Amino acid sequence: MSIAIDNRHNEIQAKTSDNGANSNEIAIVIQNLKKRYGTVDAVKNVSLEVRSGEIFGLLGPNGTGKTTTLRCLCTLVQPDEGLLEVYGISVTQNPAAVRQRLGYVAQEVALDKMMTGRELLEMHSDLYHLSKAQRTDRIQSVLTTLDLMEYADRLIGTYSGGLKKRLDLAAGLLHNPQILVLDEPTAGLDIESRQIMWTLIRELQQSGTTILITSHYLEEIDALADRVAILDRGTVIALGSPQDLKKSIGGDRVTLRIREFTPLSEATEVREHLLKLDVVKSVTLNEFQGNSLNLVVEAQSDVLAQIESKLNSLNLPLFGISRSQPSLEDVYLAVTGKCITEPLN
Amino acid sequence: MTQIIRPTQSASPAQFDYPDLSPSIKILHFIQETRALTKRLFIQLIRRPSTLIAGLVQPLMWLVLFGALFQNAPDGFMGTSGQYQKFLGAGVIVFTAFGGALNAGLPVMFDREFGFLNRLLMAPLVSRSSIVVASAIFIMSLSLLQTLVIVGTIAILGAGLPNILGILLIMAIVMVLVLAVTSL
């Protein structure tokens, strides 16, 4: 505990000598993080740096160590190996100081349904040792930001899923954390609640909060995050801004569905035909979307026409065809190789 | 990402950051967090009165139903004080306090199950023992309440009321017992 005090003291001094936000400042450092659970390597080797004030997205299929990484960072799990730092403070050596700076909102809500929203927030502010005045002030502020005022004095047991999620986030924001860690904040939310979350996340960033977020909604990360890391089987396999990642895989994308649910044999056959076209660079078969075909094509204007006439000449129907610039989802599919099975040869 | 500057602080570092934690502030913080956690347990109890009622009815059932079984035991079999109700009352009080204390860990286990404990552990608690202390305080108060009801009941059943000093002694014994068992 005495270490914590010294450290805090030093930082306050450091702050007075060096004020002025530095955009190059590093908020979170994770280096060679490893964590095993029994015989399972939950996190094999994760290294990344999050800059101060940015929104950093963590993507990856289920069970690739996103949550474990976050839990290590949030002092809830002791990592086996690796360096974890939050604003230069070691997470393993000085967890108390790190907790003071972090707000963690877990995947599952952590609420007590026998309390009212306000009572829960009051309890949390006591756990963060806010004074009476700060307490009233902060509770008022988070309730307003999350549009929860009218529900504050109802029992949490009567809340809807979206309200619970918002209250959970409110509890994480009470102490004005410098870094907010959100584990799938919008999973299972309706559009309105998601919108509130998005706006809030953006506002928090404006006010200087660093945000580390995981999500399965790729378009969400695409819209929100300044930089993303894609995890697969416990390692980082891609890292960069969404724009750079999208640029790096090149070409335009065409999604083609011959029928709503195309038989595999037919889809494979069409794939062979399409590959003969010059403009088509590659075709992958997406079993998880009713055997639709995902094409990478040259960025030419008449690509769709060429494909359609090809299908016409083969006497095949067309359920849907769409063309787009590469999305983050394409990046994700390209680097993880998940959800897409190469056609059988 | 050429340079890493540290130690650093970004815009408006938590205004609730305390630069120095003197021992007295630590104690104040400890009291604050313990009080908050205890309050939560009492809110649960009041909103879910069935727990409270069950907790009060159970020892009475022991007292009346179970007690009736041995009522006709031979004289002198149960100590020399003679009065059966007094003997039985003491037994049931200890029994109840013991049972309550054994269950003291239950709320913490439930919190763990539902992820609430993680949230508590993420808070910068001065000492995590406040979670256990809150639980102990809660069970202690509950046991004292049960004790009072039992003492009242055996008084009606004919053992007579002990004097103030006697009640205080009983309470002290119950508290020590609960604390001892809870800390297991």
Image (cartoon, coloured by chain):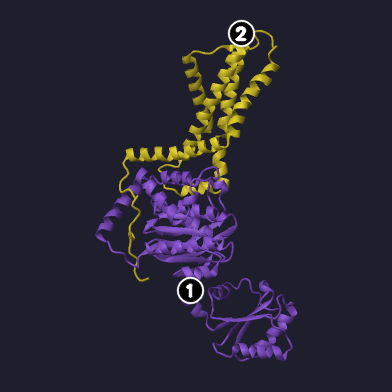
Chain colours: A purple, B yellow
Q: Chain of mark 2?
A: B
Query: Can residue A132 be seen here?
Result: yes
**Classed neighbour count for the residue bearing mark 2: other residues with Cα under 10 Å, few (<14), some (14–19), many (≥20):** few
**Classed neighbour count for the residue bearing mark 1: other residues with Cα under 10 Å, few (<14), some (14–19), many (≥20):** many
Q: Which mark is residue A242?
A: 1
Q: Which mark is residue B68?
A: none
**Can you say whether A221 is above or below A185 in the image?**
below
Q: Secondary structure at mark 1?
A: helix
Quadrant for the N terminus of chain B, please: bottom left
Residue A123 coordinates in the image, percent (x, y): 45, 43
- The answer to whether B25 appears left or right of A317 in the picture is left
Choose between A95 and A147: the one closer to the eye: A147
Mark 2 vs mark 1, CA separation in Å: 85 Å
- Which residue, given by chain and number where applicable, does mark 2 sit on? B82
Q: Chain of mark 1?
A: A
Residue A5 coordinates in the image, percent (x, y): 33, 47
**Can you say whether A155 is above or below A39 in the image?**
above
- Amino acid type of the residue that numbered disc 2 sits on in the rendered structure: Gly
- Amino acid type of the residue that numbered disc 1 sits on in the rendered structure: Pro
Between disc 2 and disc 1, the foreground one is 1
Residue at (68% x, 84% y) in the render: A271
- The answer to whether A134 appears left or right of B131 in the picture is left
Residue positioned most to the left: A17
Residue positioned most to the front: A150
Q: Secondary structure at mark 2?
A: loop
